Image (spheres, rainbow, N blue to C red):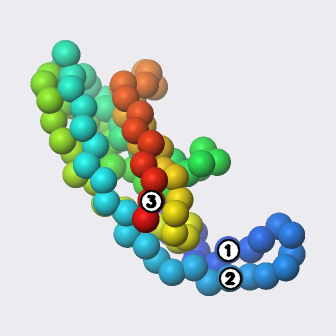
Amino acid sequence: GKEVGREQVYTDGFKVERKEMLVQRHNFEVNLVDPVSGVNLDVFDKYGNKVANILENSGLHHGYRTIPTVFKHYLGKGQTFYFRMTDRNGILIKEEVVEGK
């Protein structure tokens, strides 16, 4: 994805605040019973906006795996992130909710 910008404008009109860039790391763990093709692993914020794309149209063999993830964001500290793995049809394979630092 592209970086939209480093400034956050609040809808209450009170302030414009520069947010620092933060790095979020998480190990996404999944156990696949069957091989899956067209896998996407995306990260969303609490509003459903896509924050990062980790895997896109990937093929994964069956079995247990840990996928290390890292992405940058400007959303501020203490955010909740939703890691969603889907197949090529958009069917949810697994979701993990991660509380950011």
The spot of residue 53 in percent (x, y) is 39, 50
In the rendered image, the quadrant that contains the C terminus is bottom left
Instruction: Of the two numbered discs 3 and 2 on the same chain, state the one appearing first in sequence.
Output: 2
Spatial distance from mark 2 to mark 1, Cα to Cα?
Answer: 6 Å
Dot label at residue 8: 1
- Against 36, residue 58 (above or below) is below
Spatial distance from mark 3 to mark 2, Cα to Cα?
Answer: 20 Å
CB atoms of marks 3 and 2 within 8 Å: no
- Against 28, residue 91 (above or below) is above
Instruction: Of the two numbered discs 2 and 1 on the same chain, state the one appearing first in sequence.
Output: 1
Q: In front: 56, or 11?
A: 11
The spot of residue 78 in percent (x, y) is 52, 63
Q: Quadrant of residue 6?
A: bottom right
Amino acid at circle 3: Gly
Residue in the picture at 57% in, 79% down: 19
Amino acid at circle 1: Gln
Dot label at residue 100: 3
Amino acid at circle 2: Glu
- Say what secondary structure mark 2 lies in: strand
Dot label at residue 17: 2
Residue in the picture at 28% in, 43% down: 28
CB atoms of marks 1 and 3 within 8 Å: no
Residue in the picture at 52% in, 52% down: 80
Q: Residues within 10 Å of mark 2 (few under 14, many from 20)?
A: few
In the image: residue 83, left or right of residue 6? left
The spot of residue 77 in percent (x, y) is 51, 69
